[in-house]
Image (spheres, helix red, strand yellow):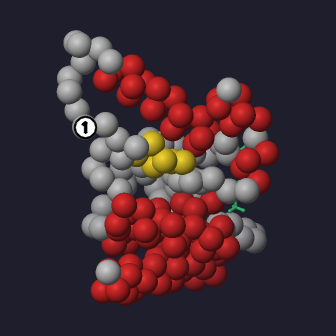
Amino acid sequence: MPADIARLKQIENRLLWLSCWIVHNANHLRAKSEGSVKVGGHQASSASCASIMTALYFHALRPEDRVAVKPHASPVFHAIQYLMGNQTREKLEAFRAYGGAQSYPSRTKDIDDVDFSTGSVGLGVAVTTFASIVQDYLAAKPWAARKPEGRMIALVGDAELDEGNIYEALQ
Ligand SMILES: Cc1ncc(C[n+]2csc(CCOP(=O)(O)OP(=O)(O)O)c2C)c(N)n1
């Protein structure tokens, strides 16, 4: 519906702005310790994923689905979770700093319900593939609790496809 597209476009614009701001703030606005040059972060890598992540998180995903987000798109993921009320402004302001939102989505260090940690490129493809196999295994067992089956989704970058572990996992 055109109204849905307009609504998604508005969210996409906010995600583009916020993900770029998270990185800009970390490098240029936040107080730095003596001698540090830059913090880092990837605005272009986030921008390249904003549209597809808007469509996924605000239209396509169901509660049982799980997503592995490519490492450099972490600011978009954190921005999405901030809009949904699952992430704090303080953590975004402390992006890549101690106690702040993580450079790469982390299940152990982030508070915004990361499905799969993806700091190591290529891992997202393998882990979603194997999670899907485990889900199929459980669905086939009479002793396992019946639950709605989710889709396992990996968002990957082009350079990430150079990782051999992706092809080993697919085989
Ligand atoms: C196993 C492993 N090797 C190398 C890296 C370093 N690294 C982080 S992101 C990246 C490439 C990202 O490029 P691409 O997949 O095209 O995504 P983009 O950020 O350009 O959107 C690399 C080599 C890593 N994180 N993990």
**Residue 151 falls left or right of residue 103:** left
User: Looking at this view, is 140 or 14 the one in front?
Assistant: 140
From where the camera sits, is residue 155 visible?
yes
Q: Alpha-carbon neighbours of circle 1 within 10 Å: few (<14), some, or many (≥20)?
A: few
Residue 9 in the image, given as x and y percentages of width and height: 43, 83
Q: Going by the picture, which residue comes out furthest to the front?
A: 1
Q: Is residue 170 above or below residue 7?
A: above
Q: Quadrant of the C terminus?
A: top right
User: At 47% from the left edge and 84% from the top edge, which residue is drawn?
Assistant: 13
Residue 96 in the image, given as x and y percentages of width and height: 57, 61
User: At 30% from the left edge and 44% from the top edge, which residue is drawn?
Assistant: 64
User: Looking at this view, is 119 or 156 the one in front?
Assistant: 156
Q: Quadrant of the N terminus?
A: bottom left
Q: Is residue 159 above or below residue 59?
A: above
The image quarter containing residue 137 is top left
Dot 1 beta carbon under 8 Å from ligand 1: no
The image quarter containing residue 11 is bottom left
Residue 59 in the image, given as x and y percentages of width and height: 34, 66
Residue 83 in the image, given as x and y percentages of width and height: 34, 72
User: Looking at this view, is 145 or 118 the one in front?
Assistant: 145
From where the camera sits, is residue 87 visible?
no
The residue at which mark 1 appears reads as 148
Residue at disc 1, secondary structure: loop
Q: Amino acid at mark 1?
A: Pro
